[in-house]
Image (cartoon, grey):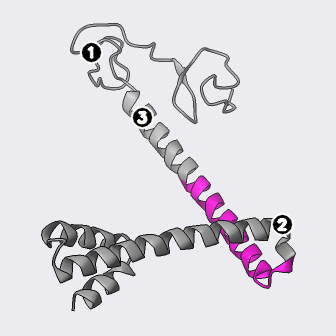
Amino acid sequence: MANDLFGGLGNLGGLGGILGGIAKSVVPKDTPEGRLLNAQSELADLQKQESDLLLEIGKAAYAQNPSAWPQYAKLQLVEQNIAAAQATLDEASAAQKAAEAEKAAEDAKGRCPSCGHKNPEGVKFCQECGAALAAAGSKHCSSCGAALAAGTRFCGECGAAQSA
């Protein structure tokens, strides 16, 4: 029974190791069950070492002559799919960053630089502390919302071209 329980879980990877570790700390080592658990744990550790070494050997052999392996075409397809997935992830990450920057720029509009109070649009002085706010006609980047000097053609923060 113990062999079925922990042997089966050992094939699940980390879960078997965790449960085996808990069982080893609960089951005395000098009992038949304890010896069985210790032997299973040692076997699982050695099998993991073997798998890691075979993986290392396989990678080295493949690197020497990739096209000699029958799985070469399939691996190329997997690598292309990985590259496409990475590109999708990069695009999604860039879109998320742009959305966050846009939200931050929108949130920053009308905020007092002294106290952080959100003031209504067009107010020249903070309604909370009286500090002067940015000039009502000041220009902000159309991409990231950074404050821009008059006549600026490209944003100094994100490099985006600005309309005239």
How far across and how far down the image is residue 36, in percent?
26, 81
Say which element carries label 3.
Answer: helix
Mark 2 or 3: in front is 2
Quadrant for residue 11, please give it. bottom left
Q: Is residue 88 magenta?
A: yes
Residue 62 against residue 71 in the figure, above or below: above
The disc placed on residue 9 is none
The disc placed on residue 104 is 3
Q: Which residues are magenta?
A: 68-92
Residue 127 against residue 29 in the figure, above or below: above
Q: Which residue is mark 2?
A: 64
Q: Residue at x 38, y 72 (%)?
A: 42
How far across and how far down the image is residue 97, in percent?
51, 44
Q: Farthest residue toward the front?
A: 30
Looking at marks 3 and 1 on the same chain, the residue that comes earlier in the sequence is marked by 3
Mark 2 and mark 1: span between their CA atoms?
64 Å
Looking at marks 2 and 1 on the same chain, the residue that comes earlier in the sequence is marked by 2
Task: Please say if the residues under marks 3 and 1 sit with CB atoms less than 8 Å apart.
Answer: no
Per the picture, the main secondary structure of the magenta-coloured stretch is: helix
Around disc 2, counting alpha carbons within 10 Å, would you say few (fewer than 14), some (14 to 19), or many (20 or more)? few
Mark 3 and mark 1: span between their CA atoms?
17 Å
Quadrant occupied by the N terminus: bottom left
Mark 2 and mark 3: span between their CA atoms?
51 Å
Mark 3 belongs to which amino acid?
A: Ala
Say which element carries label 1.
Answer: loop
Q: Residue at x 34, y 73 (%)?
A: 41
Horizontally, residue 78 falls left or right of residue 91, namely right
Mark 2 belongs to which amino acid?
A: Gln
The disc placed on residue 115 is 1
Q: Residue at x 29, y 73 (%)?
A: 38
